[in-house]
Image: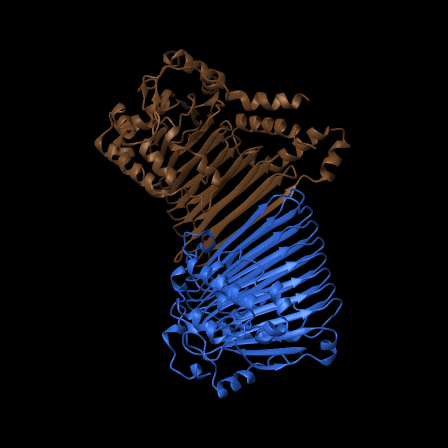
């Protein structure tokens, strides 16, 4: 305990010594996990740093990706924790809530007795590693990175200590969303949020991750991994609201596994981070499944939002549809690199991928790499990418109705985003997305 | 049952070779000696020799691009090729002067008839050097230059040196460096201001010797307001060992000029065809690449246009047909570098059997540019269940009032389409050919008549055997 109040020592920087330090501090972790962490720490040190020569990092500014200057996040002061708990109440109608600050659990709203009785598990990992070790041993970090961030996945595995385990047993349907807030605080702090959602056969659940910072301007590192398992017939909706502060570097890898007849809807929102790298791998493993993947990004100033996706169709008769929309202001930069891979046996696949970029400034840069690799012949696959500006006629129409130019621009950005926002069935969640977008556009 | 032989007949059109006595032979393998030998044989000026030697170093220093391209490139063994073979240094101006065996080769491929029929000029390259080169007299009177690269650099340095290696620098990629070190043959064309060459100029490339690697170099300059159409065709016999063809083609269209470059590539399936092609388009000019790839084991070719002058226009029309054992890795590059430039890419590919076709594209619009437009469409047709197609475009857009759109689709020939045609009395094979020809019909129409007829027939033959 005394280490928490001492001056931060060198051993807390993300250099070679930090891992031993981390292990001694967390002696409570189960043995299988310690082993896994040790292996991953070795891998992390051995794996090469991203370089522009790597296809998976094409167009990215890799210079800003060094993590050595960050250190393990420290526990929050009581009043800081209190203010963050107060800020974690945007969603009122939820079935459960976890609030993390610097990877410590700050507060929680437990599941109803009814859901507990049905066998639903909704626990912070710090408890779940002890209480549900058998589930985690099977599912924790069981999916490999496929899109270039192997090194950051290894770093995450080695230094992660908290996050969410959500387990929904067969035939259990949860109507209201469950939500986890992840906050980062302090200069050069590193956090490693984790999400693991396991939805068993014919279950139904909506889960929301909200990421944010305690203060506006201190630089933080967020290195997260999320994995969603949709069992046969399961319906899983996932929201990812990334609002780290604009001095921060964030990585997130989302892997989704869709089994037979499952239905997945994922919504991403990118507002924060100086440099965000998101990787989304959707694995279609069962016939009859359907994945809808959406993302909205508002980038301004010198933000770089780098998103890479892979839709792997390994089973026949399945469908996936991806739509990523970016609005770019100032000198911001976005990268969308998507790939649809259809395996030889995945006949009758319907797979689509669309990227749309709205350039609101002549200095913004939108990169688009929509790719296809098709090994089956009886498929319907298409991709499209388009980049353009606000239509002058539309703007003129609004101006002629007495609306100011900035207000008209905001309206038109919302018109551009509406195609995705209207797909959210939960009104409160849709409003949450809208609010974050609005705040950002107003502040510019 | 006749389909098998039918396919073979056509694919085999170029499959014959002659034992030829070469007067000049740089031996097997690649080293500075080979490069010096080529420069000596051609008695080239010193700056060309230096250019070659520098390029060789660049070639050695560059890694194979297998981090993005196919691993099949590792099967190229540079030390097993012969880099220079020729029977003589001066191309014949009269068909009668061409050596008998070379003449027979080209007559079997139909070169002199084609010239008589409709070409304004023709050059036929046999291994390293042009064996025959001729152009209609009126054109030379108007000042059009149509010669081989050796002749061009020697006799017209004031025209060609300015642009030689400027559109595609030595270090552009590993294979452009290799070509720069050992290039021989290819065409140098200059069209003076305002001259519009109505009939196409044509070059024919032929690899005759086993293990021979061909590195032709072409530079076409269309001066202000000039217009020219150039066509090239390629064949090689089927040897057991692999062969490399690595060309560099540079086009320069000055203000208001138009260049159209048509390729029908039908190398045999032992050829690695790794080609760099790029045009530089000045103000109000237009460069159009029409590219059709049917042959080779692996083709990697992404014709590009640098749109350097205001209102310049670039276009790539591409057809690829990948059969068993073939990989057609083709695409296009459009680099916008001036306001109000427009570009258009339409690529269609057909994969048959275990064939693989890949589209790679790059569209780049930097900041500070206004009113640029790009349209890209790529469509792939997969015939058999084990056929494969990939699409990897890269699009970067900045600047003011620029717009791009990219669309790609993958489909197969639907059972309904075939059923409809069959119940109208066509056989399954005919129905398949008709549907596939329909898929590329709008592009085929852009080829000169002789080529589009040939192309249609080739597809008919490929499709007949593919049903089932």
Q: Determine the image quadrant of residue A181.
A: bottom right
Q: Determine the image quadrant of residue B389.
A: top right
The quarter in which the C terminus of chain B is drawn is: top right
Extreme residue in the bottom direction: A79
Judge by depth and name the residue closer to the eye, B353 or B430.
B353
Q: Please, is residue B48 above or below residue A194 in the view?
A: above
Rendering coords of residue B251 (x, y %): 38, 37
Marks counted in the figure total 0
Judge by depth and name the residue closer to the eye, A287 or B156.
A287
Q: Please, is residue B372 above or below residue B254 in the view?
A: below
Extreme residue in the right direction: B423
Report whether A394 appears left or right of B205. Answer: right
Chain letter, colour brown in render: B
Rendering coords of residue B351 (x, y %): 59, 37
The residue that appears at 49% across and 40% down in the rendered structure is: B330
The residue that appears at 60% across and 26% down in the rendered structure is: B457
Rendering coords of residue A83 (x, y %): 52, 85
Chain letter, colour blue in render: A
Rendering coords of residue A199 (x, y %): 68, 66
Report whether A132 appears left or right of B373. Answer: right
The residue that appears at 48% across and 23% down in the rendered structure is: B239
**What coloring was used for the rendering?**
by chain
Q: Please, is residue B241 above or below residue B251 in the view?
A: above
Instruction: Tell me if residue B154 can be seen.
Output: yes
Instruction: Tell me if residue B260 can be seen.
Output: no
Extreme residue in the front direction: A31
The quarter in which the N terminus of chain B is drawn is: top right
Judge by depth and name the residue closer to the eye, A81 or A405.
A81
Extreme residue in the left direction: B46
Report whether B94 appears left or right of A207. Answer: left
């Amino acid at each position: 305990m005394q280490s928490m109040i001492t001056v931060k020592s060198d051993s807390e920087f993300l250099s070679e010594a930090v891992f031993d330090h981390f292990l001694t501090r967390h002696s409570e972790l189960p043995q299988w996990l310690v082993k896994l962490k040790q292996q991953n720490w070795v891998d992390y040190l051995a794996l090469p740093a991203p370089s522009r020569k790597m296809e998976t990092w094409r167009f990215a500014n890799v210079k800003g990706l060094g993590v050595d200057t960050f250190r393990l996040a420290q526990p929050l002061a009581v009043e800081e924790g209190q203010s963050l708990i107060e800020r974690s109440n945007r969603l009122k109608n939820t079935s459960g809530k976890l609030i993390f600050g610097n990877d410590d659990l700050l507060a929680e709203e437990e599941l109803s007795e009814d859901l507990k009785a049905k066998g639903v598990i909704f626990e912070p990992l710090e408890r779940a590693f002890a209480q549900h070790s058998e589930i985690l041993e099977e599912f924790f970090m069981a999916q490999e990175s496929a899109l270039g961030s192997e090194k950051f996945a290894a770093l995450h595995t080695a230094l992660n200590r908290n996050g969410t385990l959500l387990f929904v047993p067969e035939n259990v349907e949860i109507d209201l969303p469950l939500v986890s807030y992840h906050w980062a605080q302090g200069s050069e702090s590193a956090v490693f949020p984790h999400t693991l959602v396991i939805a068993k056969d014919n279950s139904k659940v909506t889960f929301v991750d909200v990421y944010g910072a305690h203060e506006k301007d201190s630089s933080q590192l967020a290195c997260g991994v999320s994995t969603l398992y949709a069992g046969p017939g399961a319906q899983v909706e996932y929201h990812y609201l990334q609002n780290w502060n604009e001095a921060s570097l964030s990585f997130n890898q989302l892997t989704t596994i869709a089994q037979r007849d499952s239905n997945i809807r994922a919504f991403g929102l990118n507002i924060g981070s100086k440099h965000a790298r998101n990787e989304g791998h959707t694995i279609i493993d069962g016939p009859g499944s359907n994945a809808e993947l959406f993302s909205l990004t508002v980038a301004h100033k010198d933000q770089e939002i780098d998103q890479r996706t892979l839709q792997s169709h390994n089973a026949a008769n399945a469908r996936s549809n991806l739509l990523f929309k970016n609005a770019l202001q100032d000198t911001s930069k976005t990268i969308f690199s998507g790939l649809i891979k259809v395996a030889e046996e995945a006949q009758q696949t319907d797979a689509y991928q669309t990227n749309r970029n709205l350039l609101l400034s002549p200095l913004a840069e939108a990169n688009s790499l929509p790719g296809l690799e098709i090994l089956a012949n009886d498929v319907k696959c298409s991709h499209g990418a388009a980049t353009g500006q606000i239509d002058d006629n539309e703007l003129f129409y609004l101006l002629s109705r007495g609306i100011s130019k900035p207000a008209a621009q905001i309206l038109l950005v919302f018109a551009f985003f509406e195609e995705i926002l209207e797909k959210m069935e939960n009104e409160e969640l849709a409003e949450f997305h809208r609010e974050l977008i609005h705040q950002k556009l107003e502040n510019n | 049952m006749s389909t098998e032989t039918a396919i073979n007949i056509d694919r085999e059109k170029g499959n014959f070779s002659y034992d030829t006595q070469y007067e000049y032979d740089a031996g097997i393998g690649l080293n500075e000696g080979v490069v010096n030998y080529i420069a000596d044989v051609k008695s080239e000026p010193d700056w060309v020799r230096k250019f070659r030697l520098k390029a060789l170093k660049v070639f050695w220093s560059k890694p194979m691009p297998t981090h993005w391209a196919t691993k099949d490139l590792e099967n190229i063994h540079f030390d097993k090729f012969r880099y220079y073979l020729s029977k003589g240094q001066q191309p014949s101006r009269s068909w009668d002067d061409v050596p008998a065996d070379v003449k027979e080769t080209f007559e079997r491929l139909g070169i002199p008839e084609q010239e008589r029929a409709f070409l304004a000029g023709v050059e036929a390259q046999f291994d390293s050097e042009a064996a025959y080169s001729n152009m209609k007299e009126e054109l030379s009177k108007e000042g059009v230059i149509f010669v081989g690269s050796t002749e061009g650099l020697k006799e017209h340095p004031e025209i060609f040196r300015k642009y030689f290696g400027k559109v595609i620098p030595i270090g552009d990629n590993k294979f452009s460096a290799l070509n720069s070190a050992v290039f021989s043959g290819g065409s140098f064309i200059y069209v003076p201001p305002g001259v519009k060459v109505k009939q196409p100029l044509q070059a024919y490339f032929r690899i005759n010797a086993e293990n021979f690697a061909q590195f032709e170099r072409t530079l076409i300059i269309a001066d202000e307001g000039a217009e020219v159409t150039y066509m090239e065709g390629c064949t090689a016999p089927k040897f057991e060992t692999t062969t490399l063809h690595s060309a560099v083609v540079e086009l320069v269209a000055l203000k208001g000029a138009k260049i159209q470059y048509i390729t029908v590539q039908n190398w045999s399936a032992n050829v690695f065809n790794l080609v760099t092609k790029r045009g530089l388009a000045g103000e109000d000019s237009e460069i159009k690449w029409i590219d059709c790839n049917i042959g080779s084991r692996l083709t990697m070719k992404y014709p590009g246009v640098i749109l350097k002058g205001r209102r310049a226009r670039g276009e790539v029309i591409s057809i690829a047909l990948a059969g068993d054992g073939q990989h057609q890795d083709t695409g296009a590059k459009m680099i916008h570098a001036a306001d109000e430039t427009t570009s258009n890419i339409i690529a269609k590919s057909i994969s048959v059997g275990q064939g693989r076709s890949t589209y790679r594209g790059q569209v780049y619009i930097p900041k500070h540019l206004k009113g640029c437009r790009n349209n890209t469409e790529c469509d792939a047709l997969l015939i058999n269940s084990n056929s494969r197609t990939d699409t990897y475009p890269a699009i970067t857009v900045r600047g003011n009032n620029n717009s791009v759109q990219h669309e790609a689709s993958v489909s197969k020939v639907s059972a309904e389409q075939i059923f409809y045609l069959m119940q109208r009395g066509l056989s399954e094979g005919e129905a398949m050919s008709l549907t596939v020809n329909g898929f590329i019909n709008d592009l085929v129409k852009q080829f000169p008549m002789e080529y589009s007829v040939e192309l249609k027939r080739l597809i008919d033959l490929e499709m007949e055997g593919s049903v089932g």
